[in-house]
Image (cartoon, rainbow, N blue to C red):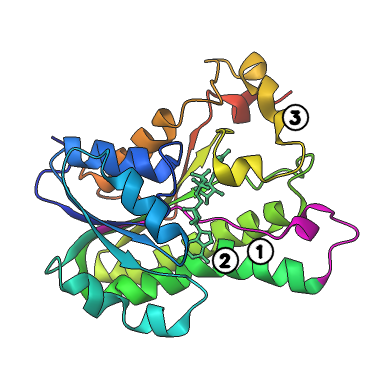
Amino acid sequence: MLLQDKKLLITGVLKDSSIAFHVARLAQEHGAEVVLTSFGRTMRITQAVSRRLSEPVQIVELDVSNTEQLETLADRVGEHVDHLDGVLHSIGFAPKGAFDFMGAPWEDVSTALQISAYSLKSLTTAALPLMGRGSSVVGLTFDASYAWPVYDWMGVAKAAFESTSRYLARDLGPMGIRSNLVAAGPVSTTAANSIPEFEQFAKWGEHAPLGWDVRDPVPAAKGCIALFSDLFPCTTGEIVHVDGGFHATGF
Ligand code: NAD
């Protein structure tokens, strides 16, 4: 029971393929109370998929580009839990045009940066009134050290996301709040499948020393559970690779 009595805010549960769904499921198994966020038309889908969790959950609306929803988030989450021990950022979006590096217009790039990188800061700031010493922010990246095939401006957004986590670690550390990321290998989710030619990553397992199954979101979710737990009390600004070891060897 790594998360006994902890209270977590989990964004990004869209389907049961979502990495966040498995974080929520495992968090409950480890004794946590979970509140989810979703937004707009996806609220209904999140509601349906949340019934597959072992404990009932409350769902609060949050579009990370909506200032009013961000400003009222702590009050609305506070109606269900009196504080938060952890916040999961599991949000990614880039318009189709952002996956054409040389041709992408700024409107598409700026949307990718706002939803996929700046949102780590805006979500954290919005949840901060409920967070205290010992609490933790965890997010999911796709290792931004490389210029991947097809990832394009989403890769640039992930580089900004990783940097944002380090700055959060700097500014939240004195409050006793940690900020860490899991760099997951490719997982076949709604967001991933919207990336043109995502199937290029299907061979990841052939190059990862431990192997890798793109249909399995559980290893990445387990990494998040570990980072939310009290087992990393002095770790912040860190990126833990959960990728079968691919980053250590490459192609
Ligand atoms: P997913 O499609 O299941 O989840 C993406 C989530 O982002 C969805 O729940 C969607 O509703 C949410 N979202 C999009 N725009 C939003 C907005 N404006 N406000 C609030 N929420 C919004 O896909 P996933 O793969 O589970 O993605 C979760 C995270 O994992 C993302 O940050 C993604 O980049 C990261 N990641 C994914 C992979 C992979 O291969 N799937 C690998 C590494 C990292």
Residue 10 vs 63, above or below: the answer is above
Q: Quadrant of residue 128?
A: bottom left
**Circle 3 crowding by C-alpha within 10 Å: few under 14, some 14–19, many from 20:** few
Judged from the image, the secondary structure of the residue bearing numbered disc 3 is helix
What residue lies at 26% left-to-right and 76% top-to-bottom? 74
Residue drawn where x is 46% and y is 83% of the image: 67
Q: Earlier in the sequence, mark 2 or mark 3?
A: 2
* Label pair 1/2, CB-CB below 8 angstroms: yes
Residue 133: x and y, percent?
Answer: 19, 65
State whether label 2 is within 8 Å of ligand 1: yes
Percent x, y for residue 6? 15, 52
Q: Which residues are magenta?
A: 86-105
Residue at the spot of label 3: 200
Name the quarter where the N terminus is drawn: top left
Secondary structure, mark 2, is helix
Q: Is residue 227 visible?
A: no
Quick one: quadrant of the C terminus? Answer: top right
For mark 2, does the 10 Å Cα neighbourhood hold few (<14), some (14 to 19), or many (20 or more) residues? some
Side of 164 relative to 138 (left or right): right
Q: Amino acid at mark 1?
A: Ala
Distance (Cα) linking label 2 and label 3: 24 Å
Q: Which residue is mark 1?
A: 112
**Residue assigned mark 2:** 115
Q: Height in image: 134 above or below 212?
A: below
Q: Position of residue 77 (x, y in %)?
A: 23, 70
Q: Residues within 10 Å of mark 1 (few under 14, many from 20)?
A: many
